Amino acid sequence: MQRNIIEQKMLEFNNRDNWHESDAIEYQELTTKMNNFKKFDRLSQHPLRKIKVNENQVVVTKDMLATPEPSTSEGFDNARRFRFTISTSDVDTSNDVVNQNGWVLDTFKRNPVVLWNHDATKLPVGKCVDIGVENGKLKATVEFATADANPFAEHVYKLVSRGFLNATSVSFSAIEMNETTDPDRGADTYEGGIDFIKQELFEFSIVNLPANTFCLIEPNQRSLDVSGVIKPISTNSTNNIDNDINNHQRDLRKLMLELHSRYNRGI
């Protein structure tokens, strides 16, 4: 039921003089739905969160920056295949966390297309030939379409293979989620994070810019040049490394919020 229909029905109830028991039950159901809309209005106020509320569905888009590695699957021509990390449980720039054990992949596997920037009006740039959670991260192998099948896919493939593109983005339906209670993740504020506990993957895309900027480079992956942007991480102890990483994540979130604010103000 659309929001405007709910509002109209609630208005009609409020203008009634006499209510039946069934009316009270229906009004309570409408109130619950309206409260959900208002809740997501607040959650969607975060400038970096991509969330849409449909009738019975919360659709979320999450980006991921992780340098892809060439596929090494046996028995296949791996020339056009790359392995991507498309989701992790790290806190992203929206203060959100996605539970990696909560992924539902059945629907996606029936039509495993890989798009460019979530544009379903264009031909896919590739197909996902393998996907699953490995070591707490959702990983997927993409086979890019050939130039004769999709010339634009050839451009994307070359940019990935030459290190110019490293980001992916997942689009999913939130089945179960909670608002964070962690003050460090903005609990009880419009910047408060969401814990996505169970979610169904719709599709994932190759994109230009990610929201999840934290990922450890895996063996045999290309390295990212962040000199002059991020201070070196301490190697004195594990605790120092963890603290530095947490500080970097916090600084990146603040920086992206500030850049978004300046953009809106035309600065």
Image (cartoon, rainbow, N blue to C red):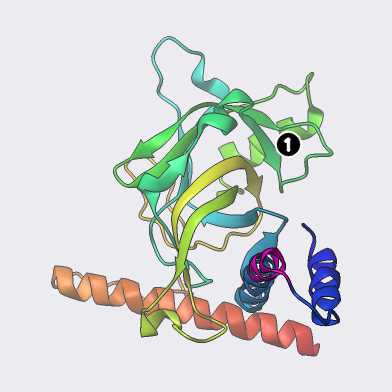
Q: Which residue shows up at 64% across the image and 70% down it? A: 28
Q: Residue furthest left?
A: 237
In the image, what residue occupies the spot 65% across and 50% down? 207
Instruction: Identify residue for label 1.
Output: 155
Quarter where residue 163 is shown: top right
Nearest the viewer among 92 and 224 is 92
Query: Residue 205, how many percent across, how many down?
Result: 64, 43
- Residue 262: in magenta span: no
Judging depth in this view, the residue of 9 and 55 nearest the camera is 9
Question: Could you say which is closer to the camera, residue 78 or residue 108?
Answer: 108
**Above-or-below relation of 261 to 236:** below
x then y, percent, for residue 220: 36, 39
Which residue is pictured at 62% across the width and 41% down the height? Answer: 202
The image shows residue 19 at horizontal and vertical percentages of: 75, 74
- The count of marks equals 1
- Residues drawn in magenta: 20-28
Is residue 225 in view from this perspective?
A: no
Q: From this viewpoint, which residue is outermost toward the top?
A: 75
Q: Main secondary structure of the magenta part?
A: helix
Local secondary structure at mark 1? helix
Residue name at image x 61 percent, y 75 percent: 39
Q: Amino acid at mark 1?
A: His
Up the image or down, 65 lies above or below 206; here it is below
- Mark 1 burial class by Cα count in 10 Å: few <14, some 14-19, many 20+: some
Please state the horizontal and vertical placement of residue 143, each as a whole percent of the image. Answer: 58, 26
Towards the viewer: 207 or 94:
94
